[in-house]
Image: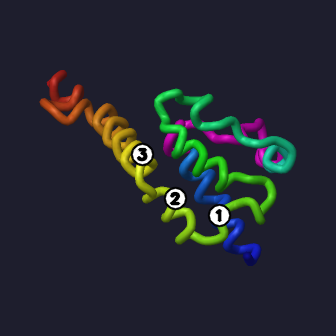
Amino acid sequence: MDVKASSDIFTVGLILYELLTEVTPFHAESAIASLVKRKQQRAAPLTDVDRNIPVALSSIVAKCLKKDPAKRYQSAEALDADLASGKAEAKIKGFLLLRAGSACGGFHGRSSRSQAL
């Protein structure tokens, strides 16, 4: 796998981590300190940050964030295949729908903002 693809997969992992947890996996006081953390530490599993996140999704993001590029997904297609695989897909979709519903004030009825008006 070339360096660019490996970096892209890592970046996808960072974005997914932040979208799902609303925290950065390598938070530090400065950009340099954050880069050092990326080299020295592994990100906390998503399930440690939010127990509602499916284990399958946590594992997929963890694989994207592996320190060793050879242990990451070798392509976007491989990542997509894991995201779409059987039970993982159903659990991930259920989680995302639940998360989206709570962010919008629920699927049934009005949002909390429109209720206040």
Decide: is 45 above or below 36. Answer: above
Left or right of 51 on screen, residue 99:
left
Earlier-in-chain disc, 3 versus 2: 2
User: Badge 2 is on which residue?
Assistant: 82
Earlier-in-chain disc, 3 versus 1: 1
Earlier-in-chain disc, 2 versus 1: 1
Give the structural element (helix, strand or loop) at label 1.
loop
Q: Which residues are magenta?
A: 18-34
Q: Are marks 3 and 2 in contact (CB under 8 Å)?
A: no
Left or right of 94 on screen, residue 27:
right
Q: Are marks 2 and 1 in contact (CB under 8 Å)?
A: yes
Give the structural element (helix, strand or loop) at label 2.
helix
Residue 97: image quadrant is: top left
Left or right of 65 on screen, residue 111:
left
The kind of residue on which mark 3 rests is Ile
Q: Would you call the spot at circle 1 few (<14 residues within 10 Å), some (14-19), or many (20 or more)?
A: many
Disc 2 versus disc 1: distance between alpha carbons? 10 Å
> What residue is shown at x 13% (from left), y 30% (from top)?
109
Percent position of residue 84, x then y: 43, 59
The kind of residue on which mark 2 rests is Asp
Of the 4 image quadrants, the one containing the C terminus is top left
Q: Is residue 31 magenta?
A: yes
Residue 38 vs residue 93, the one in the foreground? 93
